Image: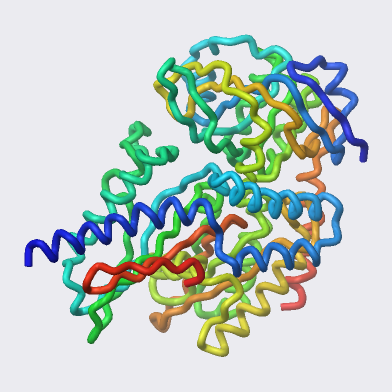
């Protein structure tokens, strides 16, 4: 039993180490397609040149086996843990921590993590409560899905929360999203993905907004009402004219993704979490026997 | 909208020729700087250990590999959000003769007047395009304040560095001001239709 556990722990650590670097180097096909589509749609001269430069950069990263963007971010992992997966989440966390550290030292990657008060660097992209791991638990299953979303600061700094009131309605939600993105301008490296979380509570709305940016680009929420809001917001955001890198143009966002939760009758929270054009994510499926499949499109 | 090629360090005369919206490609030497190195200079009052007159400052904290001889090789060098560092603009021009500040996402309007007065420009780069940017960096020639890693002061030698847009020129014009003004108008129209 202890041998199996050691092997599984190693498999999860290896998965984390691979995912972190892989996500930084090789962006998903759905994102590449969305960027190419944006490049075709854009009519402003600076906007076109920005998008051509972005596409060229993605190719150079591939050719040179280099990172797409220098910001190695803060390592965020989303775990779906099967009820029968043979490694306890407490050990999964340690494996993700060690994998993040190993990838940072071996590559080497820039170390971003600092103590939030002293601002002293805490080491190879790990620290107190870093990496950040979110958990879902799945009954009647023995597998583990790990999605790594290295989140850069340029986009994360463009996060906004408003506790709208019920009388603000859906209009209040739309208004806040639009004002947030116009206010953000070129800072979060547009055109990216606007993640919106609505409902739940203050903290949960922001969690949902972050979950929204980690979805494959352009996927739609299963709830048709929410999907309709995604379509509408994507269109309206692209009417603002902020454009690629805030230099003006037609394409301000690639897509707007919305996640929702039911909420209190007197709450109407709306959270915005921006994801830059280099919307990096990579997933591993780890089986109960430690076999790992990597999945760039999940 | 003109295209320019400039070598840094540059003179005030070179900088005054540039107009907002122009495209620029840069050769020569550029200095990497970031939040902590600015804070050290302006808030802690520690003089920078190199001459910044005529300099091109790039908002960056690179991924590097340390060599056995103590030097650094560039691995992945890109550009960070400039707006966080806007309050240092005036001091950089007035006290140190900096001629260009480059980063991504633009500088707020409070940078316009110091840039006009001191003959400076803001260059907008494509944020996130670090793999490309790295190919334009020939060498890391010096690293100062290594204890701030990765937010040290870096001296890079560059060739064909760009594309860069003159986001703010030294004549009171800002692409970011204009885009924001238009976007604010567009937003009013959109909100009226909701």
Extreme-bottom residue of the structure: A224
Find residue A215 and report its horizontal and vertical position in percent.
50, 71
When the figure is inspected, residue A247 is found, relative to residue A214, above or below; the finding is: above
Name the image quarter holding residue A122. Answer: top left
Q: How many marks?
A: 0
| Colouring mode (rainbow / by chain / secondary structure / one colour) | rainbow
Q: Residue at x 36, y 61 (%)?
A: A77
Find residue B88 and report its horizontal and vertical position in percent.
61, 26
Q: Is residue A257 left or right of residue A262?
A: right
Give the quarter of the figure containing the C terminus of chain B.
Answer: bottom right
Extreme-left residue of the structure: A1
B128 vs B47, nearest the viewer: B128
Q: Residue at x 27, y 80 (%)?
A: A138
One can see residue A270 in this view? no
Find residue B122 and report its horizontal and vertical position in percent.
74, 32
B41 vs A170, nearest the viewer: B41
Give the quarter of the figure containing the N terminus of chain B.
Answer: top right
Q: Is residue A177 left or right of residue A22?
A: right
Extreme-right residue of the structure: B2
One can see residue B143 in this view? yes
When the figure is inspected, residue A159 is found, relative to residue A82, above or below; the finding is: above
Name the image quarter holding residue A37. Answer: bottom right
Find residue A192 and report its horizontal and vertical position in percent.
62, 60
Name the image quarter holding residue A171. Answer: bottom right
Q: Residue at x 61, y 78 (%)?
A: A230
When the figure is inspected, residue B188 is found, relative to residue A70, above or below; the finding is: below
Q: Residue at x 61, y 81 (%)?
A: A229
B67 vs B127, nearest the viewer: B67
């Amino acid at each position: 039993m202890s041998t199996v556990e050691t092997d599984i722990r190693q498999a999860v650590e290896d998965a984390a180490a691979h995912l972190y670097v892989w996500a930084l180097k090789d962006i998903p096909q759905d994102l590449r397609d969305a960027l190419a589509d944006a490049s075709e749609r854009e009519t402003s001269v600076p906007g076109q040149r920005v998008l051509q430069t972005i596409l060229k950069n993605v190719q150079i990263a591939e050719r040179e086996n280099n990172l797409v963007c220098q910001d190695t971010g803060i390592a965020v992992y989303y775990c779906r843990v099967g009820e029968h997966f043979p490694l306890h989440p407490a050990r999964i966390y340690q494996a993700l921590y060690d994998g993040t550290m190993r990838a940072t030292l071996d590559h080497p990657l820039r170390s971003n993590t600092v103590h939030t008060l002293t601002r002293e660097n805490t080491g190879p992209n790990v620290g107190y409560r870093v990496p950040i791991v979110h958990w879902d638990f799945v009954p009647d299953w023995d597998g583990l899905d790990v999605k790594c979303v290295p989140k850069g600061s340029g986009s994360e700094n463009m996060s906004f929360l408003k506790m709208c009131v019920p009388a603000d309605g859906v209009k209040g939600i739309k208004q806040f999203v639009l004002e947030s993105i116009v206010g953000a301008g070129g800072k979060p490296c547009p055109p990216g993905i606007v993640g919106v979380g609505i409902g739940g509570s203050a903290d949960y709305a922001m969690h949902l907004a972050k979950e929204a940016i980690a979805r494959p680009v352009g996927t739609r929420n299963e709830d048709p009402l929410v999907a309709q809001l995604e379509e509408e917001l994507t269109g309206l955001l692209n009417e603002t004219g902020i454009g690629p890198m805030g230099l003006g143009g037609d394409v301000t966002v690639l897509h707007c993704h919305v996640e929702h939760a039911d909420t209190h009758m007197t709450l109407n929270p709306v959270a915005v979490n921006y994801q830059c054009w280099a919307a990096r994510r990579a997933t591993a499926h780890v089986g109960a026997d430690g076999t790992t499949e990597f999945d760039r499109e999940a | 909208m003109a295209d320019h090629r400039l070598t840094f360090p540059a003179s005030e005369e070179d900088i005054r020729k540039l107009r907002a919206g122009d495209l620029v490609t840069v050769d020569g030497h550029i200095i990497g700087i970031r939040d902590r190195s600015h804070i050290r200079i302006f808030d802690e009052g520690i003089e920078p250990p190199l001459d910044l007159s005529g300099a091109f400052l790039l908002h960056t904290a690179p991924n590097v590999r340390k060599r056995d001889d103590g030097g650094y090789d560039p691995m992945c060098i890109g550009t960070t959000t400039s707006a966080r560092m806007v309050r240092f603009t005036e001091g950089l021009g007035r006290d140190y003769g900096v001629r260009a500040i480059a980063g991504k996402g633009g500088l707020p309007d409070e940078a316009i007047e110091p840039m006009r007065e001191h003959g400076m420009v803001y260059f907008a780069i494509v944020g996130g395009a670090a793999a490309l940017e790295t190919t334009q960096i020939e060498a890391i020639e010096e690293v100062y304040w290594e204890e701030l890693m990765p937010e040290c002061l870096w001296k890079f030698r560059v060739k064909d560095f760009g594309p860069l847009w003159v986001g703010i020129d030294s004549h009171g014009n800002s692409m970011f001001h204009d885009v924001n003004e238009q976007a604010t108008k567009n937003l009013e129209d959109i909100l009226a239709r909701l």
